[in-house]
Amino acid sequence: MSDTRSFNGDFKRFFGRGLGILLPSIVTLWLLFQAFVFVFNTVAEPINRGLRTGVIRVIPMAFAEEDMPTWFIVTDEQVTLRQGRRKIEGLSEMSRGKIREEIRRRQFRDEWGKHWYLNGLGFIVAIVLIYLAGLLLGNYLGKTIYLRVESLIARIPGFKQVYPHVKQVVDLIFGENSRMKAFSEVVLVQYPREGIWSLGFVTGKSFQQVRDSMGGETVTIFIPTSPTPMTGFVINVLRKDTKTLDVTIDQALRFVITAGVLTPEHDVSASDPSGTPRLVKAQRAAERAITESSENS
């Protein structure tokens, strides 16, 4: 009975240790894969379809009939066979010219798929287009045209209810303005009651009515919840009631996500009496545990 309990205990301990070691890497790879699939399906593949359509249009102008690629050639027998299949499948009638184009597109898509590197063209074109857009919109003329087009788009019913909020979030992350600098400031504030200090991120100044009501310089602070900092609470406090911390936004987020387990390495409070940061000690302890497990096995 004792052997069974010992085996169960060892199994749970080693299984938990292996899960703790492997799970972060597995989750990271899964998230990266899902991001790749999303970008490929929503950005790269539509661009690839456009490239294939452009190639099909250019081929007749660039090559003589006898020099056409094999995938471009569609015989009358193929068209007739496809017409018959459409009738059997109960599809609407289509002219022979359109059927020929459909078969040609399918043949080119199959030929395209045989060369894996061609699928990367969509990513390359997307990167170039985004770069050119940023380059053009960086000058006065491009920025003026963009603002006018944006003002027209923002008036579209339905679109105007969503676009401003999405734009604020995007500007907060990628924008080159002072709001990003304000958001990167980490502070301590007494919340939810006096005597309890919570970590928060300054998102900007409070709006005018709040400043007038509180009678002083006020700031808006986002208090994240642990372990999911995407949710939290927004509060308005007097600037003098906050304490600015000398830590980066990434360090503060790690502190929140890990429920305070990981603290900034340069922080004195994150060290034991020997002066070794807790994060470093935890990493060394994990390495020792892995080594001991390998030696015992």
Image (cartoon, rainbow, N blue to C red):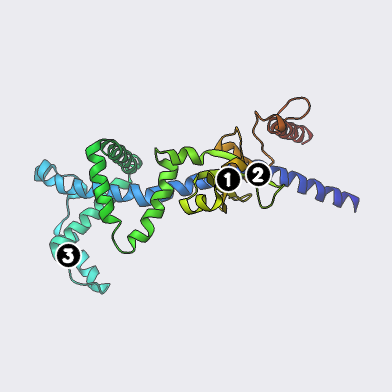
Per the model, the C-alpha gap separating discs 3 and 1 is: 78 Å
Front position among marks 3 and 2 = 2
Image height of 249 relative to 212, above or below: above
For the N terminus, the image quarter is bottom right
Q: Pinpoint residue 164: horizontal percent, then vertical percent.
A: 37, 54
Query: 291 or 87, which lies in front?
Result: 291
Image point (56%, 43%), residue name: 201
Q: Which residue is mark 2?
A: 258
Instruction: Give the class, few, some or many, for how many residues have Cα within 10 Å of label 3's Cα (few <14, many ≥20).
Output: some
Instruction: Give the class, few, some or many, for how many residues have Cα within 10 Å of label 2's Cα (few <14, many ≥20).
Output: few
Image height of 95 relative to 143, above or below: below
Q: Which residue is mark 3?
A: 80
For the residue marked with disc 3, what is the amino acid? Thr
Question: Which labelled disc corresponds to residue 238?
Answer: 1
SS at circle 1: strand
Badge 3 or badge 1: first in the primary sequence? 3
Query: 82 or 269, which lies in front?
Result: 269
For the residue marked with disc 2, what is the amino acid? Thr
- Disc 3, disc 1: CB below 8 Å? no
Per the model, the C-alpha gap separating discs 1 and 2 is: 29 Å
For the residue marked with disc 1, what is the amino acid? Leu
Badge 1 or badge 2: first in the primary sequence? 1
Quarter where residue 257 is shown: top right
Quarter where residue 75 is shown: bottom left
Query: 44 or 151, which lies in front?
Result: 151
Front position among marks 1 and 2 = 1
Q: Pinpoint residue 142: horizontal percent, then vertical percent.
A: 24, 40
- Disc 3, disc 2: CB below 8 Å? no
Badge 3 or badge 2: first in the primary sequence? 3
Image point (67%, 38%), residue name: 262
